[in-house]
Image (spheres, rainbow, N blue to C red):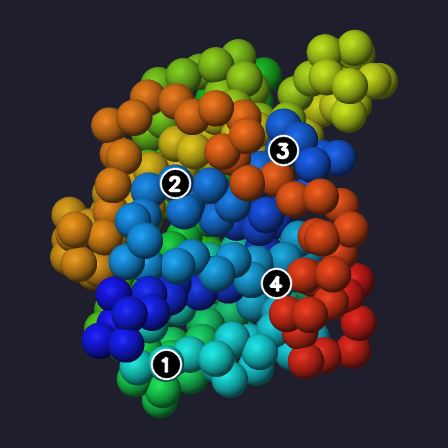
């Protein structure tokens, strides 16, 4: 807690791998949605991640400006982009070792200019396998570019990407699919026709990623270790997993932007 009794804040900037989901999309979840499970009341997690946002469009839509206006000294800005940046469409695409790094630098510099602490977290890999059962590394150049920028700017870097490669390889194709949004018809009421989504995690996968991020932040003393808790809790009840009422989610999306709409 700060001397005035208020918590330090951990702002999250990222894409659909990080964002909080509506209850109508459960069991889909971003790791930022469940990260508060691993923090005490000394720190407040403010998840500003947005589905469909790249490092560029997040800033263009005013979401970075919204965060920077609220950052106080010794707050944290945790930044994780890549899933959308690698898409080929012009409206999202950034080049890994060019404008992607340039946009990430704006997050890093913006935080430091306000006395806050930036942290870079690479995205987890998708669940895509070839016909021989080998995991495809779809966007590895983006974690490489993020790591390079972290070194250049002396910014803490959490390599969730490398960790996910290890996990997915251990689990194999079917085990990994169980963490992603692969649901058979009738398996979940939100997806009566089923879904096959190799990008987005179910809550179990999101919790695993959040646990890893929290552990890294504490064990490397990026944040004070006593802020982090519950790392040894094996599972959490559904009501603790942070899905938002759809109307509340829509209002929050609109509120956490200084930009031109809420579509990206």
From what the image shows, is residue 245 above or below residue 249? Answer: above
Q: Measure the alpha-carbon separation of dots 1 and 3.
A: 32 Å
Mark 4 crowdedness (10 Å alpha carbons): few <14, some 14-19, many ≥20: many
Q: Which residue is mark 4?
A: 54
Q: Determine whether 200 is above or below 74 in the image.
A: above
Q: What residue sits right under mark 2 in the picture? A: 37
Q: Which mark is first along the chain, 3 or 1?
A: 3
Nearer the N terminus, badge 2 or badge 1?
2
Residue 164: give x, y in percent of width and height.
39, 35
Q: CA distance from mark 3 to mark 2?
A: 17 Å
Residue 260: percent from the left, percent from the top? 78, 78
Is disc 2 placed on a helix, strand or loop?
helix
Q: Pointer 1: what residue?
A: 72
**Sequence-wise, which precedes: disc 4 or disc 3?**
3
Alpha carbons under labels 1 and 4: distance apart: 25 Å
| Residue at mark 4 to residue at mark 3: CA–CA distance | 19 Å
What residue does disc 3 label? 28
């Amino acid at each position: 807690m700060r001397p005035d009794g208020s918590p330090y804040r951990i702002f999250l900037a990222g894409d659909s791998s990080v964002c909080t989901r509506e209850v109508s999309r459960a069991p889909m979840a971003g790791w930022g949605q469940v990260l508060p499970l691993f923090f005490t009341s000394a720190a407040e997690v403010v998840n500003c991640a947005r589905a469909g946002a790249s490092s560029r469009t997040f800033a263009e839509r005013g979401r970075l400006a919204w965060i920077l206006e609220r950052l106080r000294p010794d707050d944290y800005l945790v930044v994780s982009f890549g899933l959308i940046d690698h898409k080929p469409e012009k409206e999202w695409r950034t080049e890994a070792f060019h404008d992607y790094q340039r946009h990430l630098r704006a997050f890093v510099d913006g935080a430091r200019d306000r006395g806050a602490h930036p942290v870079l977290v690479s995205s987890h890999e998708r669940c895509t396998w070839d016909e021989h059962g080998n995991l495809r590394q779809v966007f590895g150049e983006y974690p490489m570019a993020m790591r390079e920028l972290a070194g250049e700017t002396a910014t803490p870097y959490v390599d969730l990407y490398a960790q996910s490669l290890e996990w997915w390889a251990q689990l194999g194709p079917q085990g990994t699919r169980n963490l992603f949004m692969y649901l058979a018809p009738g398996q979940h009421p939100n997806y009566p026709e089923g879904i096959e989504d190799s990008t987005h995690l179910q809550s179990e996968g999101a919790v695993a990623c959040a646990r890893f991020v929290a552990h890294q932040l504490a064990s490397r003393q990026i944040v004070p270790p006593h802020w982090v808790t519950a790392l040894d809790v094996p599972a959490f009840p559904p009501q603790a997993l942070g899905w938002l009422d759809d109307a509340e989610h829509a209002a929050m999306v609109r509120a956490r932007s200084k930009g031109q709409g809420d579509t990206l």
